[in-house]
Image: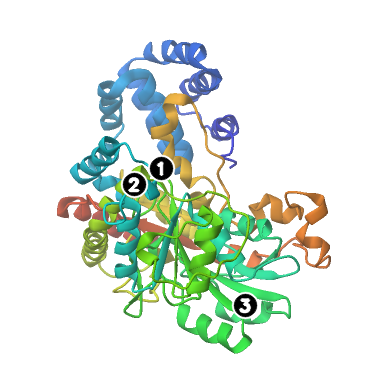
Amino acid sequence: MDFKDLRAALAAITAEQTHDGSGRALKDLQSAAYAALAGDEAHDEFRKAFVTKDDDEIADVIRYLSRTASPPAVSVVLSLIQDAVGEQRYAAALRAAGLGNYLDIPYTSTGAELTGEAEERYVLEALRSKRLWRYEVPASRSFVGRFEQGMESLLGVKHVHATVSGTTALTAAMLGLGVGPGDEVILPAVTWVGCADAVILCGAVPVIAQVDATLGISVADVARAITERTRAVMAVSLFGAPCDLGPLRALTDRHGIALLEDNAQAVGVSYRGRRLGGIGDAAIFSTKFMKFVAAGDGGYLATNSDELYQFAVHYTGGRTIPARKRAMNLSGRIMPATGLRMNELTGAVALAQLERLDELLGRLRTARDRIFELAGPARTYQRVPSNDPAGDSGWMTPLLFPDEPACQAFAAAVRARGIRHVTTSRELFAGGEIEHCYAAMSTDRYLPATGAHWATEFRAMNARVGIDARSNPWSHVPDRDYRPGFMDESLRLLRRLAFVQTNPRLEPAHCEEIAGALAAADAECAGG
């Protein structure tokens, strides 16, 4: 199912309808949802079309959707229903449909879940200062500077530099490591499209390596992919789980190439007792709204290299080096700059989030451990061991099934019990962003472009295009292409994976509900 367009998603749902009396209601919903996308006036028409339905009809539509559609599509339509009928009727319809747990058990999991008084206090302090550019503020009072220092201490690295996004930090890191035209950068088949795009923006060519069951890049496949053009390996730790950085570090050292950690989704996570961020030659992190440190947008680069740090500061901020680094021996390098540095408002939120990061991770790990302890041994799946069980965030735990039908059947059986905390990788990567974003974005009818976590969906890479044809990276490596089947090994694995998601607001009773659904679904699918 294609979730890049709500219309396509709803059309696909309708095409799968059964003769259980819900078809007419769903068709009405489809027509109304089309109108809702068109603008405010059309949204009024949507409301009129839906509020005339009685509570039983609304519950019938919701019940039907939950049985026939994948979670991202369900989430989109539920958000539209909520907009149309209001919180009270929406809640009543969910409960009547047997999906009260959608309301009662916290689902999405980011640092934003714990946003509170500290963020408000810091942002007000920044606003009242009337100084929102970090260099207008004494270093000891700059929120951005304090955030950077706090991260340096947490990660155990020499330098942290804050930027406007994780992608900016990633681009700065690669350029600072010398990645450029004619080079190749190896990255995993499963990651955010921005990883490949950043490589292309540096003028280099992305080379895809397969992933293992932890969704970390396969060390064996990286070894096969290294050529004389390889400049760096990008090790991405997805879903708060560390990839296997020890063997990767040894491999890149043997070949004299750089190791770049992309920890956008893994701040605070550890690998063999050491926080991610100081194992590679450079590391990047994100403070986007879906991350563990959630400041809306933003990112930062971490490194122990003075030269790389100075490059990143120059690249994002011109000649201005933070006062706290004044003892550094500046290189005096002349280069163009972008101005893509973090501002004080973002820094204020990020600092407050950093101060409770370990609390958030502790809650996630406690919830995970409680769920699997209560669920007990499973017959239909294997829990994929982490590269560092104690240091893993506890956010997403992968389950490996013998085949795709078994995986889908288990996820459906859990959802039938009103629990949406198990998602197949196909559902997760083919529109999972909607599951998290749409409720917040629905007021302006914005639908994010989704389905951009698989290498087969990296549009610029697969089309082999850069910003300008005159500087196309593939002009240096014309034989590097992406033939059909280039990530099939990873796709075969992904079809067998589902993930159990936790949340920092899960209470013991919530964990019991989730664990009970896991155990019951396992028994049902095992036939006993």
* Alpha-carbon span between mark 3 and mark 2: 33 Å
Q: Which residue is mark 3?
A: 221
Q: Earlier in the sequence, mark 3 or mark 2?
A: 2
In the picture as drawn, the residue positioned furthest to the bottom comes out as 254
Q: Earlier in the sequence, mark 2 or mark 1?
A: 2
Q: Earlier in the sequence, mark 3 or mark 1?
A: 3
Image quadrant holding the C terminus, namely bottom left
Q: Say how the picture is coloured.
A: rainbow
Question: Which mark identifies residue 108?
Answer: 2
Q: Amino acid at mark 1?
A: His
Q: Is label 2 in contact with label 1 (beta carbons under 8 Å)? A: yes
Asked whether residue 64 appears in the rendered view, the answer is: no
Image coordinates of residue 282 in percent, x first then y, are: 49, 71
Residue at 65% over, 53% down: 458
Image coordinates of residue 401 in percent, x first then y, are: 46, 66
Residue at 68% over, 77% down: 225
Residue placed most toward the observer, 411 or 46: 46
